[in-house]
Amino acid sequence: MKAIINTDASNTISKIDNRIYGSFIEQLGRAVYTGIYQPAHSEADEEGFRKDVIKAVKSLHVPLIRYPGGNFLSQYKWEDGIGPKDQRPTRLDIAWRELETNQFGLHEFMHWSKKVGAVPNMAVNLGTRGIQEAADLVEYCNFPSGTKLSDLRVKNGDPKPFAIKTWCLGNEMDGPWEIGTKTASEYAHLANETAKAMKQVDDSIELVACGSSSLDNPTFGTWEETVLDECYDNVDYLSLHRYYGYYGDDDPTELDNFLAKNEDLDQFISGVVAMCDAVQARKRSSKQINLSFDEWNVWYHSNDADTKIKPWQVGPHLLEDVYNFEDALLVGSLLMTLLKHADRVKIACLAQLVNVIAPIMTDTDGGVWLQSIYYPFMQMATYGHGVVLNSSVDVPTYNSRQFKNVPLMDSVTIYNKDANELIVFAENKSQRENADLSINPTGFDIDHIVEATQFYGYDVKADNRDGKMAIRPLTSVELTGENISAKLEPLSWNMIRMAVK
Ligand code: AHR
């Protein structure tokens, strides 16, 4: 099959907000305990953080991390996780039915995120708590000193304010599973009043209101409109969450349909953008609400195993999906879809980061291993910076059971002005045919190929527990005059970095 990317320097979608490569640590399963925090491990540093995990997280280049949940958030008291560790209470986490020892809390998260080079995306509990506790947390974190709560932060070891900029107003408050779930109007009112109070404490913060936790929730649409109608002036982003897998009647051999699920993500984003803009128009407002896609991933492998896990353990093996090669291809395509909406998706969080539906796994008594999904995410988070170009791509399409006119090759082209590089990420979804790729970069004078790689050659159901998966050179790439060509293998993830003269 022939695949032609026509890209023009003057036709751009948007500058990428690097926070689109964010991720998520929830106090859930082994994300924290025996994941990022394990004081008794041979790799633990002076604060109990695993250095092998810090190294793996840094190599992923995640700039922002959402914390502390997730469903956990909606029943969490942030005060339990501060102060001397021997005085912190052990509590029931009634969201996930685990024991929470609170040995890892706010200060630990702030110190750890600094060590991995990320900023926090902090969330406040609007399930069982409300305005006062949220405003108190902003005061504790961001107020310099001289008040009860800011002085308590100083006493607890951090004299400098944390200066947390981005905050989520609750988590999945439309979800019937959530502790303290709300109707749209209940949430809208609480979120708006909480937003006002939090911004009274620190008017430099940015706030994310909960949108729908899934496109499938029956309240999708009315939820967004109700929430935005009330909160519009006091919030900056609306959230979206979406997970993919073989669900319900899906046939696990229906690969063409599975690999097309990014089309669903695309429609979801376009729909929410339309709703934000409809409210903006109705309000005759000059303010634009952008999107925070603060949970996305593949999640289905661990569902059965999770039902068998005994409740009330510390750090149980919950949500430990082992990802295979087809998941990596879908994750690559989902991230490219987010980038194609970079004009409106300013924050996104791969859910999650360590052990829990995660690209990075730990062995409690051993080391770290990387999942298949680590590779496409790592390449995009490392090199996908700059401006997304609005390329026209000429490629055959296919129809699957759920999706029509799906391009057989999915791609995104980015210009990084700082590095003076043009970068193409391209995924060949064909199960049989090579993609004979031709890139016509109008307005860019290409000097040489900096790097060309492929991720390919694995059984779609193979995982990376044996550590054999690797990014390899794409040797077929050629620069001839102004044209770049390459042969992309069937079911392959590819990256071509070109130096611009
Ligand atoms: O990421 C796992 C869970 O998925 C989160 O706790 C929740 O917000 C969502 O339903």
Image: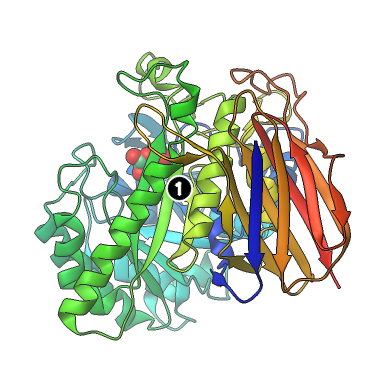
- What is the three-letter code of the residue carrying label 1? Gln
In which quadrant of the rendered view does residue 37 lie? top right
Residue 427 location (% of width, % of height): 63, 40
Please tell me which residue is depicted at 63% across the width and 45% down the height of the picture: 377
Would residue 195 be visible to someone looking at this image?
A: yes
Q: Is residue 122 left or right of residue 472?
A: left
167 relative to 249, above or below: below
What's the coloring here?
A: rainbow
Q: Residues within 10 Å of mark 1 (few under 14, many from 20)?
A: few
- The answer to whether mark 1 is within 8 Å of ligand 1 is no
109 relative to 284, above or below: above
Q: Is residue 329 left or right of residue 444?
A: left
Quadrant placement of the N terminus:
top right
User: Which secondary structure lies at badge 1?
Assistant: helix
Would residue 193 be visible to someone looking at this image?
A: no
Please tell me which residue is depicted at 15% across the width and 71% down the height of the picture: 230
227 relative to 76, above or below: below
Count of labels in the image = 1
Asked whether 484 or 243 is in front, the reply is: 484
Residue 269 location (% of width, % of height): 36, 55
Q: Is residue 41 left or right of residue 334?
A: right
Q: In what quadrant does ligand 1 lie? A: top left
Quadrant placement of the C terminus:
bottom right
The residue beneath circle 1 is 87
Residue 317 location (% of width, % of height): 49, 23
Asked whether 452 or 162 is in front, the reply is: 452
In which quadrant of the rendered view does residue 483 lie? bottom right
Residue 194 location (% of width, % of height): 24, 69
